[in-house]
Amino acid sequence: MSVPHERPLGRAATPVPLFRWVESSLDEAEYLWRCWERDLATHDRDLAGLSRWVEGRLLGSLEGLRLGVESALDTLLRPALDANDPFRATAAAYALATETSAAGYDALMEALRGAPPERLVGLRRAVELAHSELLVFRLERDLEPLSSPIAAALIDAHVFQQRAPNALLAQALVSSDPMLRAAGLRALRFEKGQVGGELANALASSDLEVSDAAMESGLWRGDAEAWAYCLHSSIQPIPRPRSRLLLALLGSEQRQMPLVDALALESTRREALFALGFAGTRQAAEASLFAMNQPELAPLAAEAFCAITGLDLEQHGFTLPVRAAPVEPIPFEEEDLDGHLVPQPDELLPMPDVARVAKWWRQHEREFSSGPRYLRGRTLTLERLQDALHTEPMRRRHAIALELAVRTRGACNVQTRTFTLEQRRQLACLGEVRAGVAASPLVNVFSRVA
């Protein structure tokens, strides 16, 4: 006689997560994903700090969410894919992208197919961070016919995962949609064949996203026309953040004069200051010190100065107290309703005591010569660029990784916007790459880095 509710021998029950636990995991993942994306652009976290303070907790909450995919798919995850908060939608999409159930995959595919552009960005983020080549290829096949926004998102997922999107590339390069064409041009850095014609045509485009994508991929491939375009576009009076940053990373001290000139224009001075921190020259340090005399530029200028010279504002006590918020509320008619409610990364930088920084420079300026580049007070080399990916603030690592990739023709390639475990795997591979700078038409540009 059997006992009621007795489990048959040899069969283990699959535990079903409680709905409230899955819901709590989603709420936590939404919050932590927002924190994680913010910290990728912050000045007060390095790679170890990101992993220790935010990412470990985020991955734990995402694992809890994945365990509930089957039990809470219709009641929790599908609605989350349409949430107004993009981080909630991204967390739910990541759980589906990394879980193997057919129903979860179908839900992710439906969300991608119907997503407006602003939500598609977050869904693409989930797909690319899943680091599954098979997933991206399945989506290409099953979402046919692909709209331009979805095709661009999938191409960018391929590029994020460091490969060329073979099936989509030809369509993208001849597209009349600038977003899709730019995605295809970004992918050309991983294409093995000759692509000079496509890059040259795109450099002449009037669309800045298209021409900038062609410039960056061209520089990855050592293309002289891309470098000429970078030099020309960086002297324009309109904002061109990418050109000016690449000029700082790759140009000689003499070539970098347009960055100093750009400090005189209100429209370009902030992007020029950010770039000067990567230029690393004595000239850049002096220009940054001079810019500190303008209070609205002082924190950004100090960041650049310290990146070059190695001065630590907080360790030396060279910071000023943060101004307290006004006690009285701002009158409604004076409030900027279009302003950011959350402080931007530049606004969180410490305010320097300019007089004390200037005194420090007078005592140490003889340690810096014209010509060489410096990083934290030391002459820059390829090895130090690699080491900087471990130690520099998160917001500076993206440009450093770009420089390494360009100078080594992609041999040293670290994706600085992925999870730290994957970044550490890529960084471990850098230790095996000591090929130096590949011969290319740009070799004279790279002569300052050994």
Image (tube, rainbow, N blue to C red):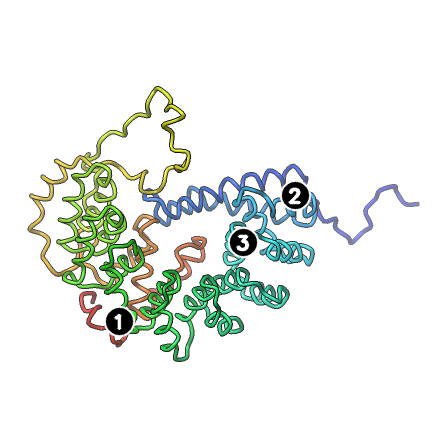
Give the quarter of the figure containing the C terminus: bottom left
Estimate the x, y position of residue 25 in percent, counting from the top left. 58, 41
Quarter where residue 440 is shown:
bottom left
- Marks 1 and 3 sit apart, C-alpha to C-alpha, by 38 Å
Look at 34% across and 69% down and name the residue there.
203
Q: Does the CB distance between marks 1 and 3 fall below 8 Å?
A: no
- Secondary structure under tag 1 reads loop
Residue occupied by mark 2: 76
Q: Closer to us: mark 1 or mark 2? A: 2
Q: Does the CB distance between marks 1 and 2 fall below 8 Å?
A: no
Estimate the x, y position of residue 83 in percent, counting from the top left. 59, 43
Q: Residues within 10 Å of mark 2 (few under 14, many from 20)?
A: some
Estimate the x, y position of residue 68 in percent, counting from the top left. 65, 46
Q: Closer to us: mark 1 or mark 3? A: 3
Residue occupied by mark 1: 437
Estimate the x, y position of residue 372 in percent, counting from the top left. 14, 60
Q: Amino acid at mark 3?
A: Leu
**Is residue 291 left or right of 34 when viewed as pictured?**
left
User: Which of marks 2 and 1 precedes in the sequence?
Assistant: 2
**Is residue 450 left or right of 239 when viewed as pictured?**
left
Quarter where residue 423 is shown:
bottom left
Of all residues, the one furthest to the right in this rendering is: 1
- Marks 1 and 2 sit apart, C-alpha to C-alpha, by 51 Å
Residue occupied by mark 3: 120
